[in-house]
């Protein structure tokens, strides 16, 4: 902006031009969506496409626009129909059935040294964990996963204690009562990102139970993201993994 | 009513007649619905047909009755089947796919000078915004829209600041965390009508999250309507747009 | 009842008498309270006085009446004022400051062999645990307690694993996220009675968080009582301790 | 573990071996699930397969693995498709249409003497009751059931009073207002396990109403499990039935 | 109104007069309160003063105004301070300590034949029951009450079955799990008005638990009023007691 | 019962017989349902079949059993499939499409003099109102209905004021904000039974909004039943209509 | 800003100066508070001091700073202690006991022509209404108020219909069931701002009941602000009153 | 543990000794509390004393025990009385009035290079922010704070953009609608820890509104802790600040 101001002062650009510039620089306007092409610079990762509630053609057009930035592309909560449509223009697009993500790799990244460790309480929590893994991997992290470590069998967790200790960040994905986050948080000094899932029935109230459990954890070093928000956990883990 | 009373006094009409008159004047009784044909006078806009929960034939019969008043007609939350049925009798009926509205223009209105400005936080909020726009347009307003101005990219909003300042009323449509209303409300002295949407997942609880955000806004000049109530926002914007 | 019917048939008692008998046998009517003196027979333990919402004089009169049955007496959620009033007529009444219970021992019971084991997650959960202990002890059980075994330090729990295994029934008292019940439930084959407490702040919502956690536990063999209901847990533990 | 430590000391096994042993002993790792084959020892009953949220192939593989332990196998919340798949490898697998359970009997158990008595408030509560019965039966109990004893017709309940008195444990399954648990709890000295169901409409809020009723019961000796958790009730009843 | 219209026609009163008349007839305007002196005619009982949230002087002034109608006066949720102030001008005012009501009898009513029967589940529910009784009595009913008939001791209820059958209307006041309404409703063909109370703790959530119980009752002939609304129950019972 | 006791005493029946009699008299046991054939005597109307959650064959068998009592039969929340099945054995069975009720008239009743008046706020509330009307009519009442009287057009209500005044009991059925009950309650001295419906969207939360509105009404003489419980309202109106 | 940019270009101010200017212009930084002195320009009314949660000395210092702008000053949710402290430096400060507001008039405003009309449902809603009135008056509006117009006496409302029609904006303040907003909204074509209050008990849940009522209103032209937010309603009414 | 096992093998310690060692090593048992003296090693920071719900003497005894480890000590949610008691034994104990924390510095730490930046939305959020700052400072971080940056005046935030960019971790503390976290999250690539506070009234529901806002944020890189949990945010910020 300083540069723009100086160019403007020096007469290289006019008042109208500088105002115009400031207005149209940072994003592409698709009428139904403003694509934040500037985000990669500002946030270190390009805009992610949250597909739920968008029409097929909206998603396709957004991805087409984003693809011109030559950054990696991630679309979440995407069904397979959308993927097939996207694949037409982007043959290297990949779909993860469990995570329901579309990814297009356009950069070659050197994975960071530190590891992100993803654990789930049960088998049913895997889809949310996979979303976190897809996200963190695309952002250049090496990720290790252990599924179904449970709470009602704490030895399954103690067994992977070493792996917990060797990782840099831990993502705990758990539905039902969500107690796994507290136990992992109590065992380790590493930052723990807790993801409640909507897995469960009855008084789990589609994820409220594990959400409250995780927010009330008496273990230090645990933070929480939205119910089923694997992407958010993967993203946050990536930016603190150094 | 005064007139009626005077006619009654002068003997032009009897006691029975005046009572009768007062009773049957203001609406048409369809057995399953009382159509408030009097509303156009009282409220400045005829009754709107809220289609959800009504059978196809009920909607058709209500619209047929309303159409005799020669006012504009608006039906909301209408699916396409209902529209096809309505179109049989009303070939000039129009359907907005996103807004799920049926409109029949029977009046020619001169748009008011002042502008209503509609912004959405995301692409998925567009259907609710469109309902507001259809409503406000039918009520004789010129409306301008900007979609997907987001919060996680505040420059997209700052960019349209001028438009905010030149409008008379602003409608902010936002799901997920609904923070856009607060920011718009903080930037401008214009009345802001906030519409929470059910867009989101997990702890958005089908619109409770943005609803609470908007109700608790610390920005002055912001009021709230029901979740997904684009019609209500468009209507209110219209009556305060002068 | 059979006996009554036979006596009635044999003419020992009249129709009126048998109806009368059936009616007035089981309780003492204090106008504001019907004391279920029959309960000791039916339930194996006399009626407990829940003091909250009762006036001082009501509690005193109920205890006076109950004391005539020569069973042990228990009053819960009692403040100290009530205790001082009760003590006037019942010098052997005892008050537990933490549990806020009044007890009057009128029977000599031989403690059962099996042990009830009471654990709390934190120090602040002690009052509820004490209510459970007072109840179970008065009902003739030997109780062992371990407080503050936490979750964020699972070794504190593993340390008392042997004690868990040697007990007959386990009561887990926990506020905040209430995860302790799941972990204890996963470690042992003994029945676990989980008591959520209102200890915590913010999103613990006065005990809703641990209540939901406990109801959604993926550990088998765990049941739940009301928030802060130490009495209920102690009572239930007693009737299954054999 | 003591044995392992002594073998290790005596040199029969090395430090690496003992660590290895401790690690791989208690469960089979299926990548997407860690099957707790050790649980039968620790808990007295093998791991149960909760099918909801698992793919068909995941359930099949888990059951295949569990079947090698020669214990009884129970899968809950299973649809018929999964059952047909399981039956291919396990021709003796049985499906309970109402309870939606798959069971494979691999042990011959001598039923315990004590009886578990299962009552439902209404006909619609039967599926949850059946889940409890399948569980308790597989765990070696004799179960007796009485359905639709209601509340709005208390004589239907009084009629089975004798059966209540002769049983060891009582499971009460009730939706709508869930009051049956309180009444049964008031009549008997036996432990009562209350199961709220999601049967009802309007303000039953998918089981919240009976859940709250049961948690707040003023009858002693009543504990609660999650909404629709017939399995949990059957399991708990089994471990306290002696 | 007919009369007014005819007088107006016959010229006895002018157009202005008739409009004026219609406007100022039905209530006294106290600036901070509009006293509905017309209500006694319209509703059969004068306006009741709900004291909560009103200042002492507001209550006093309202009662002073109401007293001029020579109807009975009832003020609810009144503390003793307000009563002492009211008593200065109205020496025959009475205060019910439990119900927290002020009553001033200005009419002599002949009690109706039919009886209203009020039962409470516990002793702590008495204040709400008393509010119902004060109301119904002042409205000219004979009321009979039985307190603490409980649920966890159903024989206490069966005992008063005859009284239930001989009454015209039954009011059931219950906190905690509120199951009493269902049982009473199941026993009798008389209309039952259920009043949930805020008595309880933990998951009773200040009356939500019994409220939901009562709304979901499977007994026919049961309706519900607001939590702690003894007045509403007494009022409704009065208007249906014939 | 007195008669039975006397017969028993006189030796006409034995002890076993009297016990047997008492046990099997009041209901038919269908294994999955206990049909309360005794209810017609006790409650003045036979048991109603709530179809939701019951299998087709269960409903058919219950209705077959009930039909032997020669009382009128009512089944609620029934879909058309069930009706077709019922019709095979009961050709005079009738189905109300809106109310989703099956009725079989087996008695000829003389309608009571008093009228029940049913009003709905909107057209979408009609199904719930119809359930109330079917119920009340089958119980021998004459019912009058006025639909869509709204709140946002209070003149539509004032118009039917006379009808309100001439009826004995009023049922108000309203979704969305449910304010109609308060206004009707304020206008009339007749008992008003308010039925909240799940009609609405967004913050109506499937009927919570009108439920709370109705519970908090400041109009006297209004009671509430469960959301969408047209049957309950019709039943209660019937027993107080004299 | 344009002016600043042009001055900067013309060399009147340096790059540093313009950046400085932009940074420090709009507010005074008090360390614990950033006072938005720029707001009067941007929003048309200076920052309002929300006193709840602030210490006495914080409020005083903020008001001292604001007073230098020579605009009117408004502090809400202020207790009398704070007022006495403020009055020391600002002898012309005024306190409204009911509204709990402190106002300091520093400008002379010519009241706008249009009227704002404030109605409350009950007497207990007056404090919230007063907050709205103080706000709107200070912002240069003429306000008229009518208190206790109720719902359970709709004639009290019809009586002031003319005043409703002559006003420009209407504020409806209502607790309990909050139905007044719907009725006023149905009667008039003027914009209605609905303010739910926490007045009520039981199922009003501190204002949730009227909040939901108002959000779900079927009357057009009604918008909602936060519970008890009289200030927000007064502010919004002011900016749309032309 | 390896070391212990080798010592045991080499005979330096016996089987009993090793078992004993493992048991009693990690914490001090105070009867009412198990102090996790081992935590400093495991978690990198000693156990923190959460004072709420603990008696004064319990807190004092816990702090006395912790002080022997020669680590820094932190007690949260402490009132001043507890502080005065603690100070008797620990004259260097310090109390932060706003944060309500007691700290005892026993180590000299070299502050880490990276900065933690703490912003609050309003002045009333300061106490929670202070708790975060005390925690992070005691854990060896340099912290910078900016209070009252608001949302309704986004320029106050843009003004400190540079500071946001120069920090390593950002803590956003906000009550009311909690929108600040989204905006900060959208501006920066740094990890943002959002702390909802219970500041607000009405529909903020003691912090639920900002909690939901923060969980639903559409800005990436934002995680959430419990309502008012300044400690948790400060702790988490510390462990990721490198």
Image (cartoon, coloured by chain):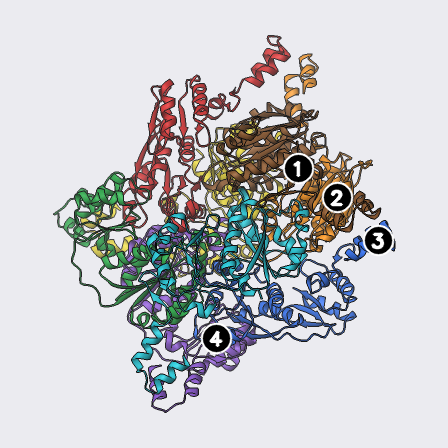
Chain colours: A cyan, B green, C orange, D brown, E yellow, F red, G purple, H blue
Q: Residues within 10 Å of mark 1 (few under 14, many from 20)?
A: many
Q: Residues within 10 Å of mark 3 (few under 14, many from 20)?
A: some
Check disc 4 and report its element: helix, strand or loop: helix
Callout in the foreground (1, 4): 4
Callout 3: residue from which chain?
A: H
Q: For the residues labelled 4 and 3, say whether their Cβ atoms are less than 8 Å apart.
A: no
Helix, strand or loop status at disc 1 = loop
Q: Nearer the viewer, mark 3 or mark 1?
A: 3
Estimate the spatial distance between the alpha carbons at disc 1 and disc 2, rounded to whole Å. 25 Å
Horizontal and vertical percent for residue G137?
Answer: 37, 71
Subunit that carries the residue with mark 4: H
Q: Say which residue label 1 marks.
A: D220
Give a yes or no on whether discs 3 and 2 share a subunit: no
Q: Is residue F138 above or below residue D175?
A: above
Question: Mark 1 and mark 2, same subunit?
Answer: no
Residue G169 is left or right of residue E142, and the answer is: left
Residue C164 got which mark? 2
- Quick check: A129 above or below G29? above
Marks 1 & 4 on one chain? no
């Amino acid at each position: 902006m300083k540069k723009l101001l100086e160019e403007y002062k020096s007469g290289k650009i006019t008042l109208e031009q500088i105002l115009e510039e400031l207005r149209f620089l940072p994003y592409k306007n698709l009428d139904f969506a403003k694509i934040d092409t500037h985000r990669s610079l500002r946030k270190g990762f390009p805009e992610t496409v949250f597909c739920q509630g968008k029409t097929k053609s909206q998603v396709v057009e957004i991805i087409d626009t984003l693809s011109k930035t030559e950054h990696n592309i991630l679309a979440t909560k995407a069904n397979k129909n959308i993927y097939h449509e996207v694949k037409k223009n982007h043959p290297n697009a990949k779909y993860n059935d469990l995570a329901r993500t579309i990814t297009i790799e356009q950069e070659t990244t050197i994975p960071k040294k530190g590891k992100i460790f993803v654990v789930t309480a049960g088998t049913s929590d895997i889809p949310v964990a996979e979303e976190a893994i897809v996200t963190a991997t695309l952002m250049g992290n090496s990720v290790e996963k252990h599924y179904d470590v449970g709470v009602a069998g704490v030895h399954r967790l103690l067994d992977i204690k070493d792996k917990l200790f060797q990782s840099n960040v831990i993502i705990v994905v758990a539905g039902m009562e969500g107690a796994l986050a507290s136990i992992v948080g109590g065992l380790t000094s590493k930052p723990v990102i807790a993801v409640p899932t909507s897995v469960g029935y009855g008084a789990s109230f589609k994820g409220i139970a594990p959400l409250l459990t995780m927010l009330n954890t008496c273990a230090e070093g645990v933070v929480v993201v939205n119910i089923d928000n694997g992407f958010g956990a993967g993203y946050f883990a990536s930016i603190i993994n150094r």
